[in-house]
Image (cartoon, rainbow, N blue to C red):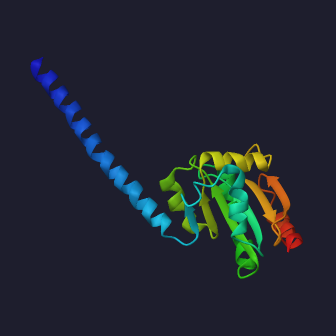
Amino acid sequence: MKKSIITALFAILSVAAQAQQNVPSAQVDQQQIIQELTSKKNVYFQKYDIVAPENILPAILDKYKGKVVLIDVWATWCGPCRAGHQAMEPLKKELKGKNIQFVYITSPSSPLPTWAEMIPAIDGDHYYLTAEQYRYILEKYESRGIPTYAIYNAQGQQTFKTVGFPGVEMIKAEIEKAQ
């Protein structure tokens, strides 16, 4: 009996020691991800954290003055969001080099490692906002879900908004109207 208790105790201590060793590794991985993200030109991770929620959309849109902007509010865990990204690929290729910018906005509800892994396959600029900023944008768009899409003309005026993917043809038509 003593031997089985000692064996069980040893097993518990071994698992606890391994868990302690994994924590620093996870922190190092997280720091490495952050370092890689902050060095990318089209990724805005923690760069807008100090912007008040009510100022976040103007701060983002200001960067694209003179361009049509499609904003896609999404999350990594959202199947319809990911399906919309795939469906939009041919249109984005068709519009490449034109006066349009695709902007993708997510929040901490998307795990950072997953987001970092997914965004290279999604051509555009990527913003990882605070939960408060993200919530404000959804409220501004009167959105009860994601994906949420908004299109702004070159003057920065919103010309279209929808909750749920409306289809490539509608997005294309709305982009053309905004130009």
Report the residue at 73% width, 45% height from top.
145
Q: Is residue 34 visible?
A: yes
Residue 126 position within the rendered picture, expressed as x and y whole percent measured from the top left: 61, 63
Q: In the rendered view, does 131 fall on the left or right side of 172?
A: left
Report the residue at 77% width, 52% height from top.
164
Q: Is residue 146 visible?
A: no
Q: Nearer the viewer, residue 128 or 6?
A: 128
Screen quadrant of the C terminus: bottom right
**Is residue 101 placed above or below 21 in the rendered structure?**
below
Report the residue at 68% width, 63% height from top.
60
Residue 54 position within the rendered picture, expressed as x and y whole percent measured from the top left: 72, 51
> Outermost residue, left direction?
3
**Is residue 152 placed above or below 52 in the rendered structure?**
below
Residue 8 lies in quadrant: top left
Residue 9 position within the rendered picture, expressed as x and y whole percent measured from the top left: 18, 27
Residue 118 position within the rendered picture, expressed as x and y whole percent measured from the top left: 55, 61
Q: Nearer the viewer, residue 38 or 119?
A: 38
> Outermost residue, top direction?
1
Report the residue at 71% width, 82% height from top.
97
Residue 30 lies in quadrant: bottom left
Screen quadrant of the N terminus: top left
Q: Nearer the viewer, residue 115 or 127?
A: 127
Q: How many marks?
A: 0
> Outermost residue, right direction?
177
